[in-house]
Amino acid sequence: ATLLGTAIVIFVFRSLPGTGAGSQWWAIDVLKFDQEFFAKLSLLGSTLTLIGLFVFRRFMAEKSIFYIAGFLTLIGTLLALPSLGMYFGLHEWTAARTGGVVDQRFIALIDTALESPLGQIAMVPMLAWIANSAPAHLKATFFAVMASFSNLALSLSNLGTKYMNKIYTVTREVKDPTSGAITTAADYSQLGSLFITVILIGLILPFVAIAIAKMFRWRSA
């Protein structure tokens, strides 16, 4: 019952769709982020993830997966709002009132700094529970099953992202390499709706999974 409840909630939590490549195209074309800045965000995120695992070790040890998943869902929803806000011009409003200090790059750095430490927290209690509670002769099997389950969830997340991008079409400008004529015009008009839909799905589905698990009286690690 504990393995099943934990697996279901983790599966749903990790299978949530994303916005896809369209949001990165928009960040490059509209917010003027370059590869160097993306590399800085990646480095900052990786570093703070490691720090977060240390800082939140007691939180992970004392709280159940249901509690952690709910907590991360709420925090993840809040941290997704700055990107939505920047789509509607938040960075222009803040930059105008702070002398250009709080611009799109400042907001992205702060958002990454807050979000990254929470990245792997949901997985650690599950792995610790398997290490401590699974039968000695089945520990490797439990780990393999949960790893496969997690990979399946990530595949579903990619599939969901694909369908989100079919519903909300986002295109980047494409030019003919010979003539320089524009063959595909940039269109980010539906990106705001995509952001909102993904945020709402990410907020609702984990709590639905937790409610279902509790309804069937499944437990969590």
Image (cartoon, rainbow, N blue to C red):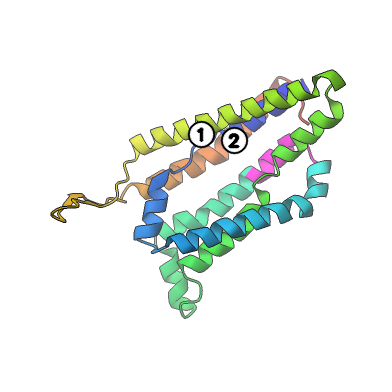
- In this rendered view, identify the residue nearer to me: 49 or 190: 49
Instruction: State yes or no: discs 1 and 2 in contact (Cβ < 8 Å).
Output: yes
Q: Which of the numbered marks, if any, corresponds to residue 14? A: 2
Which of the 4 quarters of the picture holds residue 169?
top left
Q: Is residue 86 magenta?
A: no
- Rate crowding at label 1 as few (under 14), some (14 to 19) or many (20 or more) other CA atoms within 10 Å: many
Q: Which of the numbered marks, if any, corresponds to residue 9? A: none
- The amino acid type of the residue labelled 2 equals Arg
Quadrant in which the C terminus is drawn: top right
Q: Which residue in the structure is indicated by mark 1? A: 157
Q: Which residues are magenta?
A: 62-72
Main SS of the magenta segment?
Answer: helix
Residue at 76% in and 29% down? 220
**Residue 9 horizontal side relative to residue 193, left or right:** right
Q: Is residue 100 above or below residue 120?
A: below
Residue 105 point in image, percent of width and height: 48, 66
- The amino acid type of the residue labelled 1 equals Ser
Which of the 4 quarters of the picture holds residue 212?
top right
